[in-house]
């Protein structure tokens, strides 16, 4: 029955209704003296009814935003009392326009159509009331009988008044549609903002996972080696500790760069390229795993930066998984073709995966399946990296080996001379 309305709008509606009473009531009383009620006597009682009906109608207009249903009922009640008392139409009746506007603009769906029906019914009743009760139809000069003149006059007045009521109701309906469109646009903007924020969080999480997971895998491998070599070969332990320090510093630098991008909402900072792959392979090699790398054919020019980043991150995650869950060396193959680059990383795994886990890993039904009992976000991150540049990635275990295969489309490449220019 009552809608939540800001206090400012409610105060403005009340102030507007007060001004409406003050403006229309004097004119209504002036006409009431010349055209008193046909059934209410003495005259002071007729004037009192005018004042009460004016206050009630404008009161209904004042609450039309707060409670459109109650305002419509009050306005109908006041109009029926006015016609029952034989009072002539008055200036304060324009308050009905505000009520009809409110029912169409802020009422429920049912109340909207009830207000539309009120415009038609109100126009018909007002037309016949004015024609039959207020006007002397026999004074109209026309060759038709008096009864027909009354009907024609009532029809004309009903159409005129009904049209005015429909205009006010239609204005409220138009405002309702405009407000609904604004709410739809605001909801769309909120959804787009949330989607952009979620995409940014996923991107940051993916970068953090790529950097931290790889660095920690190298650190853990080197720390285990240093622990066992501390007594037998101190020089190997010192070398492992040096690798740990270098890897940790590199990871700290990468994390600081990501945090800076997050703080300033910048996504175009320095990113790894193909030139950094040798450093990546060296880190894996120092961790005790030899990456057997083959590049055939070689890239004919300078690949796009997004492709270079995707290749680096996919290889970084695949090698990290090999360090954590694999045994032996890793085979890495890159094929730079004219329109695409193909990546394949293959390593043996400690415990063969069960058939169900293998199938789920191939279809992407689980986040990651690179070893028995291990599941994380690595496979999802690699697949997202490939999808961001329009490529595909498939990963799965077969016969004791885990293979990651990716295909990334590339556009026109530039030669080194072109890049220098």
Image (cartoon, grey):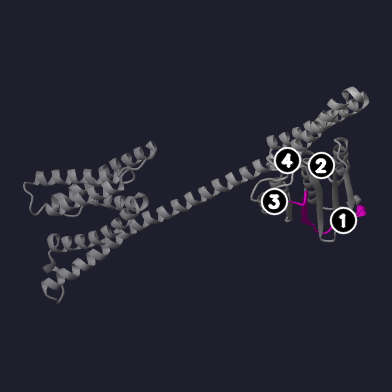
- Left or right of residue 132, residue 331 in this image: right
Q: Is residue 357 visible?
A: yes
**Cβ atoms under marks 2 and 1 closer than 8 Å:** no
Judging depth in this view, the residue of 16 and 236 nearest the camera is 236
Q: Position of residue 375 (x, y in %)?
A: 68, 42
Judging depth in this view, the residue of 216 and 250 nearest the camera is 216
Q: Nearer the viewer, mark 4 or mark 2?
A: 2
Judging depth in this view, the residue of 298 and 139 nearest the camera is 298
Cα separation between marks 3 and 2: 18 Å
Cα separation between marks 1 and 4: 27 Å
Q: Residue at x 85, y 61 (%)?
A: 338
What residue did someone put label 2 on?
327
What residue did someone put label 3 on?
358
Count of marks, rendered view: 4
- The stretch in magenta equals 397-417
Cα separation between marks 4 and 2: 26 Å
In what element is the residue under mark 2?
Answer: strand
Identify the mark nearer the N-term, 1 or 4: 4
What residue did someone put label 4 on?
207
What residue did someone put label 1 on?
414
Identify the mark nearer the N-term, 3 or 4: 4
Neighbourhood count class around disc 1 (C-alpha, 10 Å): few under 14, some 14–19, many 20 upward = some
Q: Is residue 253 visible?
A: no
Q: Position of residue 75 (x, y in %)?
A: 23, 49
Cα separation between marks 2 and 1: 39 Å
Q: Nearer the viewer, mark 2 or mark 1?
A: 2
**Cβ atoms under marks 3 and 2 closer than 8 Å:** no
Is 376 inside the magenta-drawn segment? no
């Amino acid at each position: 029955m009552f809608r939540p309305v800001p206090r400012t709008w409610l105060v403005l509606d009340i102030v507007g209704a007060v001004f409406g009473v003050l403006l229309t009531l004097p004119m209504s009383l002036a006409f009431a003296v010349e055209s008193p009620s046909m059934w209410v006597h003495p005259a002071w009682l007729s004037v009192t009814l005018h004042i009460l009906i004016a206050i009630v109608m404008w009161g209904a207009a004042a609450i039309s935003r707060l409670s459109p249903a109650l305002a419509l009922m009050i306005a109908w009640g006041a109009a029926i009392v006015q016609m029952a008392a034989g009072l002539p139409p008055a200036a304060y009746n324009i308050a009905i326009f505000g009520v009809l506007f409110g029912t169409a603009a802020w009422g429920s769906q049912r109340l909207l159509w009830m207000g539309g029906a009120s415009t038609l019914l109100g126009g018909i009743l007002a037309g016949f009331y004015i024609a039959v009760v207020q006007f002397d139809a026999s004074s109209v000069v026309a060759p038709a009988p008096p009864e027909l003149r009354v009907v024609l006059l009532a029809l004309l007045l009903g159409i005129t008044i009904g049209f005015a009521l429909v205009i006010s109701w239609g204005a409220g309906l138009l405002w309702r549609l405009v407000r609904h469109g604004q709410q739809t646009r605001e909801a769309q903007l909120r959804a787009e903002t949330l989607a952009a924020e979620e995409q940014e969080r996923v991107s940051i999480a993916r970068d953090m996972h790529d950097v931290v997971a790889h660095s920690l895998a190298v650190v853990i491998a080197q720390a285990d080696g240093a622990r066992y070599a501390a007594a037998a070969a101190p020089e190997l332990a010192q070398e492992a500790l040096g690798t740990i320090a270098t890897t940790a510093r590199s990871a700290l630098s990468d994390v600081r760069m990501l945090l800076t991008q997050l703080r300033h909402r910048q996504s175009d900072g320095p990113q790894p390229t193909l030139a950094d792959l040798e450093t990546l392979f060296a880190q894996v090699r120092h961790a005790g795993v030899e990456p057997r790398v083959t590049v055939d054919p070689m890239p004919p020019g300078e690949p796009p930066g997004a492709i270079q980043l995707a290749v680096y991150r996919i290889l970084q995650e695949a090698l990290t998984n090999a360090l954590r869950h694999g045994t032996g060396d890793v085979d890495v193959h890159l094929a730079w073709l004219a329109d695409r680059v193909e990546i394949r990383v293959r390593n043996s795994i400690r415990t063969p995966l069960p058939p169900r886990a293998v199938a789920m890993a191939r279809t992407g039904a689980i986040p990651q399946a690179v070893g028995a009992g291990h599941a994380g976000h690595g496979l999802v991150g690699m697949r997202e990296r490939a999808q961001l540049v329009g490529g595909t990635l498939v990963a799965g275990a077969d016969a004791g080996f885990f293979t990651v295969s990716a295909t990334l489309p590339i556009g026109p490449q530039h030669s080194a001379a072109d890049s220098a220019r």
